[in-house]
Image (spheres, rainbow, N blue to C red):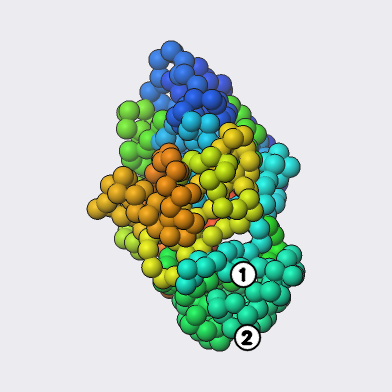
Amino acid sequence: MTLALSQSQALAVSSISVSHLTARTSGRRHFSRLSISSSSSTAKPSQPLSSPPLSRTKTGVIVVGAGLAGLAAATHLHSRNIPFLLLEASDGVGGRVRTDLVDGFVLDRGFQIFITSYPEAQKLIEYRELDLRKFYSGARIYFDGQFHTVADPLRHFSDALQSLTNPIGSVLDKLLIGSTRLGVLTKSDDQILRADEVRTSELLKRIGFSDSIVRRFFKPFFGGIFFDPELETTSRLFEFIFKCLALGDNTLPAKGIGAIPDQLASKLPPSSILLNSRVASIDLEESSLKLETGETFQSELGLILAVEEPQAAKLLAGMKRNGNGNGPGNPVPVRPKPARGTVCIYFSSDRDKVPVQDPVLFLNGSGQGIVNNMFFATNVAPSYGPADKVLVSASLIGSFEDESDENLAARVVGELSGWFGDSLVGSWKYLRTYRIGFAQPNQSPPTDLMKSHRVDSGLYVAGDYLTSATFDGALVSGRKAVEALLRDRALIQS
């Protein structure tokens, strides 16, 4: 629940140091809304102004990291008229949720799907502006040299009926999918995220699913969502995602997944987002932080650290702590669990060199090879490529650090040639490889998806590692960090 300050407290908070924000507009860095241009490289921020940087800048709240969590925190601060600065180390907003334009193709940085039923996203994001394009509600699974369909019976009844006897699982397995769906729909999100947990693989076994459907459907499908082929991820996250899939559609924004953070950033004051501003250290005694450039920023209300889990652990480990006796609330672990990584490889093709026109996700149910899933992105969203071309996306789970981009692309082509035929796949043109070492935090049990966002008085954390490792979890964590800060400020004011 959002905390409401009294009128006097709200006035006190909102009146802090607005002049500092105005002064910073003429500083070394500023934000301009990112948009996909016609160049063949990543969209760049506008050129910095030439005025000399300020040695120390003061504001109300400093948010570090302009991924979804940081943007959500900034959005909630802005809605309360609380002055803030949002510092981002890279050249654009979005964190792991970024999109590039390469040779006329829209390339998301890694395989990402937006589920429309995410509850927090529905509160913060204008879906109509995103022009969301839907995937087929199901998948086609490559097994034993053929493709087999698994479909949502409520959306594709005839397809689901025809798939009852395919070798992906037994008829009982398909009935169990329906009963599992009903089960998660009877639970609130809070109940799911606080429930007793086991590994997802253990939950599926307890429900009664056969080994065949676990290997051929659940591992490639949910393994691709969690970047976890062994399904060691907590059953809490599985049930939350399963519920969201039952209630919503899998989609892509017409301009790429990066349109989501771009939209959030576009609604913030342009002078409030500072790009290319990497934090080197935090001094909680001074409520300040220093950039790698030497610039110092000071907060009068608090700091919100909304960076990825490894970076948060690194910054907090070297932080000068507050000696006020309040003690930590919930520090980020110094040694997080090994992150989940992925590799995404893109190819282009002529229109007549693809086997299907459907907006469907293909899964590798064979248990062999390196491709986990693939799809023809322009079948889902035609805007992802030129009118006469098709964009092909193939995703691998893991980092594959010992293999070059060229070798991985060649292996993918060879593998997909077995799926679709060499005459088609052999003509595809390689575009780009994305290696995402930290694609998602590792949320294998034990987990706490309802963590405190307060580290110490004046210092708060946000990120999907604190909640659920989803788009929605990142947005929730940004809100909860602001609420924790406001609770502390309300106590100080009173």
Cα separation, mark 2 vs mark 1, equals 14 Å
Q: How many marks?
A: 2
Residue 444 against residue 134 in the figure, above or below: below
Residue 49 in percent (x, y) is at: 46, 15
The residue at the point 48 percent across, 82 percent down is 211
Crowding near the residue tagged with mark 2, few <14, some 14–19, many ≥20 C-alpha atoms within 10 Å:
few
Name of the residue lying farthest toward the left: 402
Q: Is residue 116 above or below residue 205?
A: above
Q: In this orientation, which residue lies closer to the viewer: 448 or 14?
A: 448
Instruction: State the residue position of label 2.
Output: 172
Question: Few, some or many C-alpha atoms within 10 Å of disc 1 (few <14, some 14-19, many ≥20)?
Answer: many
Q: Which residue is mark 1?
A: 150
- Badge number at residue 230: none
The type of residue carrying mark 1 is Val
Q: Is residue 297 left or right of residue 485?
A: left
Residue 305 shows up from this direction: no
Question: Which is more toward the observer, 481 or 469?
Answer: 469
Percent across and percent down for residue 275 are 46, 30
Q: Quadrant of the N terminus?
A: bottom right
Question: Relative to the observer, which residue lies in front, 255 or 295?
Answer: 255
The residue at the point 34 percent across, 54 percent down is 411
Answer with mark 2 or mark 1, whichever residue precedes in sequence: 1
Q: Residue at x 66, y 58 (%)?
A: 136
Secondary structure under tag 2 reads helix
Q: Are marks 2 and 1 in contact (CB under 8 Å)?
A: no
